[in-house]
């Protein structure tokens, strides 16, 4: 009887510990079309290199709950100051999924690259046209 009680107590404790460390999922999606398709885009979470994505690809990342900064730039292993101006801040909750689309905007003199959070419905129309990149670094 004591042995059974200890097993049940151990399972309950391990379940509680696992739940408190739950993460959120973040999708980075890249669909830039022909413009900018030759070069990989570098994604950052909290200034740390997360992924390099080529065109028509997406990646999935586990993120701890809390407020995080997401940014994208053309190249490099360190987040540049320009990217910091165009970063987005998202408060992520454990067990939820967030979708970030990498957008490329052409201008007369300067091209612009930035992130935009999209809804699950929008992501569901984009993701079928992309391939998952599990080795995106």
Image: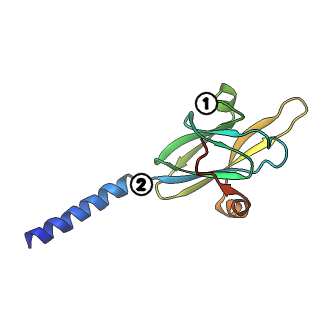
Which residue, given by chain and number where applicable, does mark 2 sit on? 22
Farthest residue to the bottom: give it.
1
* Residue at screen point 79% across, 44% down: 37
Looking at the image, the residue that sits furthest to the left is: 2
Residue at the farthest front position:
135
Q: How many marks?
A: 2
The quadrant of the rendering that contains the N terminus is bottom left
Q: Which residue is mark 1?
A: 77
Q: How far across and down, in percent of the image, does residue 79 sit?
A: 62, 30
Residue at image position (68%, 57%) is 131
Task: Give above or below for 53 relative to 128.
Answer: above
Element type where label 2 sits in the image: loop
Please tell me which of labels 2 and 1 falls first in the chain: 2
- Label 1: element kind: loop
Q: Residue 23 location, x and y as percent? A: 45, 52
Q: Quadrant of residue 45?
A: top right
Check the picture and name the quadrant holding the C terminus. top right
């Amino acid at each position: 009887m004591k042995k059974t009680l200890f097993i049940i107590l151990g399972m309950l404790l391990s379940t509680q510990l696992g739940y408190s460390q739950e993460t959120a999922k973040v999708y980075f999606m890249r669909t830039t079309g022909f413009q900018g398709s030759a070069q990989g885009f570098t994604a950052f979470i909290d200034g740390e290199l997360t992924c390099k994505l080529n065109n028509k690809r997406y990646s999935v990342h586990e993120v701890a709950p809390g407020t995080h900064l997401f940014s994208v730039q053309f190249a490099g292993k360190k987040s540049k100051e320009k990217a910091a101006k165009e970063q987005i801040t998202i408060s992520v909750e454990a067990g939820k999924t967030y979708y970030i689309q990498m957008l490329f905007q052409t201008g007369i003199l300067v091209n612009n690259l930035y992130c935009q959070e999209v809804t699950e419905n929008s992501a569901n129309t984009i993701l079928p046209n992309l391939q998952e990149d599990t080795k995106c670094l």
